[in-house]
Image (cartoon, rainbow, N blue to C red):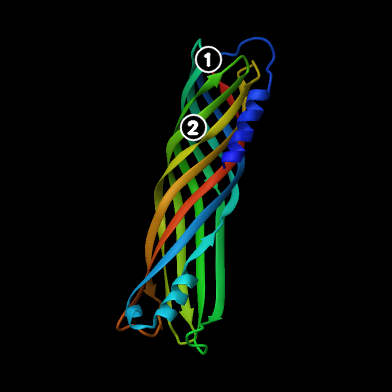
Amino acid sequence: MKRLCACALALALGLAGPAGAADWTGWYVGGHAGYADGDADTRAALGGAWNSESQGLRNEVAAGLSADLGPSGAAYGLHVGYDHGFANGLLLGAELEYSTLDLEETRVDGPRPTATFPSLSYTYAHGVEIDDSLALRGKIGYAGARNAVYAILGSARVDVDTAAGIGSNGGYAKAGGASGTETAVVYGVGYAYDFGNDWTLRAELTRTDIGEVEFETAYLPGSSFLTPAYTESFEQDIRFDTLRIGASYRF
């Protein structure tokens, strides 16, 4: 992330625009498209009747239920905003954007025999899907004749679906997940070029940090070991980086 930010800023600062100053002040609308790459780090904790099992088995199951997913995919949408350019080059702005995100990954691991009881095997499943996002972002930077560089900070509401499950050859079967809209922090850097005809081209690198999503599993129909209950709880830390280009029309 830091290296990409540095490269983006170096490229922006190194571009020389044509003579004549652009007017960066005004409302604008536009579209954007790019690629997003995420991380969804899942950590599991066992409780209930798991405490009666051996430490070795608990460690194996907890490790199997913990996974690092890497959802990725296209990111595209629309934006509307307002910029104000000051005489000293300071650029301030605010923007509302809607993006469609196609980030997902599903993983099934197993059957995996346990070292503690070789005749006992478990299958683990994990999944995460990141969909639509609505963000309100602030902008601060420097605008020259045709080029502008800026930092981004804002908040987003992101649709997230996450799930995990466990099954054994002994008939144990549980699954759980969370589905809803999460609040995230958005920050990053951007570069914009003004063509002098009300059109602006830009490139941005941002990170959206959703934070931790928590959920627990529930017994599936036909599962064994219902009483006393075994419990599995999860914390999934989700974030993604987006590299995109966009075009805006100022009016």
Query: Sequence order check: which comes first, mark 1 or mark 2?
Result: 1
Is 55 above or below relative to 105? below
Q: Locate residue 141 relative to residue 157 in the image: left or right.
A: right
How much space separates mark 1 and mark 2, taking CA atoms?
17 Å
Q: Which mark is residue 13?
A: none
Please tell me whether residue 184 is drawn above or below residue 31 in the rendered image: below
Question: Label 2: few (<14), some or many (≥20) within 10 Å?
Answer: many
Quadrant location of the C terminus in the rendered image: top right
Name the one closer to the observer, 243 or 32: 243
Q: Residue furthest front?
A: 55
Which of the two residues, 165 or 131, is positioned nearer the viewer here?
A: 165
What is the number of callouts on the image?
2
The residue lying at 45 percent from left, 85 percent from top is 171
Residue at (54, 17) in percent of width and height: 24
Q: Give coordinates of residue 223: x percent, y percent.
A: 40, 82
In the image as oriented, which residue stretches furthest toward the bottom? 119
Where in the figure is residue 195, as x and y percent of width and height? Answer: 66, 19
Task: Tell me the element at label 2.
Answer: strand
The residue that appears at 44% across and 72% down in the rendered structure is 62
> Is residue 164 depicted above or below 76 in this figure?
below
Tell me the amino acid under the disc marked 1: Gly
Please indicate, yes or no, whether residue 19 appears anywhere in the rendered image: yes
Badge 1 density bin: few <14, some 14–19, many ≥20, Cα 10 Å: some
> Which label was assigned to residue 89?
1
Q: Which mark is residue 152?
A: 2
Tag 1–tag 2 contact (CB < 8 Å)? no
- Residue at 53% in and 27% down: 150
> Amino acid under label 2?
Ile
Quadrant containing the N terminus in the rendered view: top right
